[in-house]
Image (tube, helix red, strand yellow):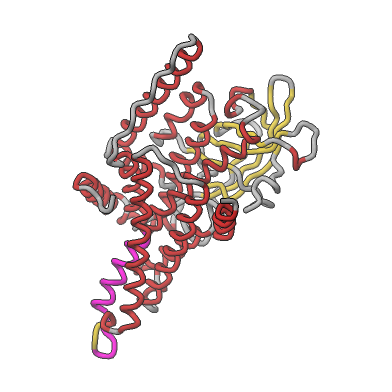
């Protein structure tokens, strides 16, 4: 795949029209007010039928898994899953709203992606069929908002090693304690995947990693107000506090205390999905910064001529276009791999995330530089995009962690 198909271009146009009508006029409200983004995102899902398609696809997946389970129980050959088409349609239709939203309000994509993507994926990858049916459908349609809670006040890149949150068994129940911070959707989440260590009286370094699904309003669970931050203002971020929260085994993801690799693999798989999505986010930001910069360079006159005629400005614009092409090709590669049933390795996802995040940040800062004093003002919008882009180098694993994953993979080949 090297360009969008005619159908995909029509989809892009329709999404842009929705954004121009429903989001651009309210950008200050989402960015500088206290209006959560969920209602407008739900409207987008309903207007484009994404909610219906997502629920139908999820239900078919549940039915398929139940048929496999029944066949195995009866000693029969399990059915094969229908092969996906080769045009990357499903992946492309997922990427397009991300790209277009990130041109205007990247925080909305973070809020949407964590709910629809990370939280649902954490349950789909390791949960039982009943758990998938119980929680995931509502997350995929945005009928409910999800949060994926792994980061803690004293842990960042060392998410597992520094983790203090615990679960201990008490009869037929588990008692959860701990706190989480920097949790996207944390203040408003209806469904929370809480990741913690299983305390069996053993050394904390040797404890298994378990995940539990919690509902808003669970006794002992406190969700903070939104935190103030540098960028991504339209993405509510908060803290979670658990004080002797009691849950049954039905809320333990997978309903087993012995998940593969101690539960770490499930979290890593979720990180991989998040990292691949960063490229689509970066592409939207880069495209918008380039559009604004080119238009400004054509119309801003200094020293008697448009600044676009100066070679230093041309150099900046040319480098922006190189970054746009490179990131777009990474997005196309992701779509193609998905269409053929392939997934990236952790190192590949890390490489894509590393490059895309750096490219978006560099392009956004250069856009501010091209616009000069105007670029520093919120009215011209590149100021917001520069603030929003920076977090791409931090969440889902910092640049430094991405480099470590890439290098380790290369060295063990």
Q: How many marks?
A: 0
Q: Is residue 271 above or below residue 61?
A: below
**Residue ID at (44%, 42%):** 343
Q: Position of residue 51 (x, y in %)?
A: 34, 34
The one of 293 and 89 positioned closer to us in this rendering:
89
Q: In the displayed structure, would residue 260 be above or below residue 152?
A: above
| Displayed quadrant of residue 399 | bottom right
The residue segment tinted magenta is: 285-304
Determine if the magenta segment contains residue 116.
no
Q: Is residue 297 magenta?
A: yes
Relative placement, left or right, of 124 versus 324 is: right
Q: Which secondary structure class fits the magenta region best?
A: helix
Query: Where does the image place residue 190, in percent across and percent down from the top left?
Result: 51, 35
Residue 233 screen position, x and y as percent = 46, 56
Please identify the quarter of the rendering in which residue 297 is found.
bottom left
Residue 388 appears in view: no
User: x and y percent of residue 43 in the render?
Assistant: 32, 40
Residue that protrudes farthest toward the top in the picture = 74
Q: Is residue 287 visible?
A: yes
Q: What residue appears at the point 49 percent right and 49 percent down from the top-left corner? A: 236
Residue at position x 80%, y 35% in the image: 202
Q: Residue at x 61, y 43 (%)?
A: 240
Quadrant of the image occupied by residue 176: top right
Residue 229 lies, with reference to residue 193, above or below; the image says: below
Residue closer to the observer: 176 or 25: 176
Residue that protrudes farthest toward the front in the picture:
413
């Amino acid at each position: 795949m090297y360009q969008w198909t005619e159908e995909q271009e029509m989809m892009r146009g329709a999404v842009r029209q929705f954004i121009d009508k429903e989001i651009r006029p309210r950008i200050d409200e989402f960015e500088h007010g206290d209006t959560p983004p969920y209602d407008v995102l739900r409207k987008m899902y309903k207007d484009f039928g994404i909610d219906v398609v997502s629920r139908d696809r999820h239900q078919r997946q549940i039915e398929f898994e139940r048929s496999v389970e029944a066949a195995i129980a009866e000693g029969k050959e399990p059915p094969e899953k229908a092969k996906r088409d080769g045009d990357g349609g499903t992946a492309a239709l997922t990427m397009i709203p991300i790209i277009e939203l990130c041109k205007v309000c990247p925080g909305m994509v973070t809020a949407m992606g964590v709910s629809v993507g990370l939280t649902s994926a954490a349950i789909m990858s390791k949960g039982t069929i009943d758990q998938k049916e119980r929680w995931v459908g509502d997350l995929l349609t945005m009928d409910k908002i999800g949060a994926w809670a792994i980061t803690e006040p004293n842990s960042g890149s060392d998410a597992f090693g520094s983790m203090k949150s615990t679960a201990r068994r008490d009869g037929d129940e588990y008692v959860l304690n701990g706190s989480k911070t920097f949790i996207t959707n944390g203040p408003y989440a209806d469904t929370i995947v809480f990741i913690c260590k299983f305390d069996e009286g053993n050394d904390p370094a040797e404890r298994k990693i378990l995940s539990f699904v919690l509902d808003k309003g669970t006794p002992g669970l406190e969700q903070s107000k939104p935190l103030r931050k540098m960028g991504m203002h339209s993405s509510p971020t908060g803290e979670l506090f658990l004080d002797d929260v009691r849950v049954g085994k039905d809320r333990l993801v997978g309903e087993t205390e012995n998940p593969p690799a101690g539960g770490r693999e499930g979290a890593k798989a979720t990180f991989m999905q998040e990292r691949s999505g960063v490229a689509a986010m970066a592409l939207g930001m880069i495209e918008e910064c380039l559009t604004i910069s080119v238009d400004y360079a054509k119309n801003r006159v200094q020293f008697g001529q448009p600044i676009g005629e100066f070679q230093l400005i041309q150099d900046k614009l040319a480098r922006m276009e190189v970054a746009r092409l490179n990131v777009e090709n990474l997005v196309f590669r992701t779509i193609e791999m998905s269409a053929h049933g392939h997934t990236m390795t952790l190192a590949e996802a890390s490489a894509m995330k590393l490059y895309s995040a750096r490219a978006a940040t560099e392009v956004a800062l250069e856009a501010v530089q091209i616009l000069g004093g105007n670029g520093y003002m919120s009215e011209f919008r590149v100021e917001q995009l520069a603030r929003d882009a920076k977090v791409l180098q931090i969440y889902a694993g910092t640049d430094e962690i991405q480099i470590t994953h890439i290098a380790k993979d290369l060295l063990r080949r």
